[in-house]
Image (cartoon, rainbow, N blue to C red):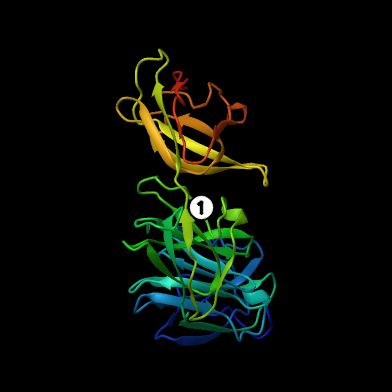
Amino acid sequence: MVSGYSAPANDSFSAPVVITGFPASQAGTNIDATIEGGEFPYFSAAESSVWFEWTAASTGFVQIDTLGSDFDTMLSVWTGSTLGALNEVASNDEYDGGNQSGVFLSAVSGTTYRIAVYGYRSEQGSILLNITPALAGSIAGHLANNDGTVPLAGITVTAYRIVTDPYFSYMFQTDVTTDELGNYSLDVPPGTYRLEFNDSASGEYATEFFDDSETLFTAQDIAVEHESAITGIDAQLADASHISGTVTGPDGNSPLEDIDVLIFKSNPAEESWSFAGNGFTDALGHFRIGGLSAGTYRVEFRDNINSNYAPETYDDAANFYYGLDVIIPEATEIMGINASLALAGKIY
């Protein structure tokens, strides 16, 4: 406790300071604030929380920050009406490497956001909480086939934002599909992004990442600033390879429907495997999965819907790491990747 102070009125989740208007700034303090029972802050070092509430009057990108506060803050934004059932929207500790905090979010008109400001460990002081427009930038480009002669419509373009707090990760931001001319445009808040191009609709073209990379981890960064328009983020997608086969029961004859067939691709540089796609068997036990680039794959079979059959990795391996590599050249159909699944054991 700090002599001469009592806990702020908005120390409790149930008694937030309501912020109105947009843009808006709200002064406050977390001196003598507490972490209340049932409150589980995103950050392990978060202490002395106070709560604010803001309802978006319109849809659009918003920045919420504590710039102007006089202590080391931490910030989380949530939706939900009770402390025990909150859904975190965004969080941050050090905005742009400083002691203050800031997040970007795509606010939805009529949605109420619960905003918690914490002190880093024992830090306490005066708060200035700001809610301002986050002037969006854009990423645009054109997709075509391998020789650039045919525009590709219906390709899903996904933007992943690089997040460094509380740990480095690639966070889904938004996606869009190309139009009939193969063009796309994504509106995104300021940040650094990597893009994925995926033919999830037909599987006729191989997935790739900008610029001509096979994995998200080796893709090129795209820096987007306030109101900047990044153009020319183009790609020419190669014809995809496919894997097909049949899944049966233990007798090798009875077709199994709705078996989940999962494809994983080897990433030699990272010495790891990444998920590359999946599909389900039809009434005849057949599957065909496309969108694959050249590389080394392993195939898993799982009865996730009914749990009647034991999982298996091609070819007849009980463990993924003992599975058989499937080498796929570019633009090739690999057939005969079959499996006969054993009945699963059950405990009652």
Which residue is located at x 67 percent, y 65 percent?
A: 45
Near mark 1 (Cα within 10 A), the count class, few <14, some 14-19 or many ≥20, is many
Residue 184's spot in the image, x, y percent?
39, 66
Q: Is residue 260 left or right of residue 166?
A: left
Tag 1, which secondary structure?
Answer: strand
Q: Residue furthest top?
A: 251
**Which amino acid lies under the numbered mark 1 shown in the image of this protein?**
Glu
Residue 38 appears in view: no
Which residue is rendered at x = 38% and y = 76% of the image? 55
Q: Nearer the viewer, residue 29 or 147?
A: 147
Side (left or right) of 161 relative to 57: right
344 and 233: which is toward the camera: 233
Return the residue at label 1: 208
Counting from the top left corner in percent of width and height, residue 72 is at 67, 77
Q: Position of residue 128 (x, y in %)?
A: 56, 85
The answer to whether 4 appears left or right of 199 in the picture is right
